[in-house]
Amino acid sequence: MEGQVLNISPIVVWVVALSQLLTFGLTIWGLMASGSRANAKKIEDHAKRLDGHEGRLSSVEQTARSLPAPEDLHKLDLSIEKLQGRIETMSAVLERVEAIVSRHENHILDGRGR
């Protein structure tokens, strides 16, 4: 057997071609994936903001639960009206008591002078 020379030049051409295609493919992949990474960051930022809003909303809901209902406010209004009526009645009674006390004072003061 004579020494045959192994010709690898066609294999080298194919390896270089595949290397170029792989490089081109990875470049395209990187360009396409960069948009999804940016979107992932935006989604993460929005998730953080949403968590913050969720906490604030829970606080508002808790505050709203502790507020009186319209029926409670109506009962309170009726109670205040009753109190105003009683105060007016007591005011009239106190005017009469004041008149009586004034007469007693006058009587006592007139009695001292005698």
Image (cartoon, rainbow, N blue to C red):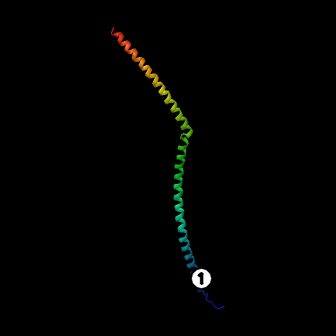
Is residue 31 visible to the viewer in this orientation of the structure?
Answer: yes
Left/right placement of residue 2 relative to residue 67 reads right
Q: Position of residue 13 (x, y in %)?
A: 58, 84
Give SS at disc 1. Answer: helix
Is residue 69 visible to the viewer in this orientation of the structure?
Answer: no
Q: Residue furthest top?
A: 114
Q: Position of residue 30 (x, y in %)?
A: 54, 71
Vertical relation: 52 (above or below) 14: above
Amino acid type, mark 1:
Trp
Q: In percent of the image, x 41 and y 19: which residue is there? A: 99
Q: Label 1 crowding class (10 Å Cα cut-off): few <14, some 14-19, many 20+?
A: few
Q: Position of residue 63 (x, y in %)?
A: 53, 43
Q: Quadrant of the N terminus?
A: bottom right
Q: In percent of the image, x 52 and y 30: which residue is there? A: 82
Name the residue carrying label 1. Answer: 14
Q: Residue furthest left?
A: 113
Q: In percent of the image, x 57 and y 38: which residue is there? A: 71
Q: Quadrant of the C terminus?
A: top left
Vertical relation: 30 (above or below) 109: below
Q: Position of residue 21 (x, y in %)?
A: 57, 78
Q: In percent of the image, x 55 and y 46: which residue is there? A: 61
Residue nearer the viewer, 41 or 15: 41
Vertical relation: 12 (above or below) 68: below
Residue nearer the viewer, 11 or 112: 112
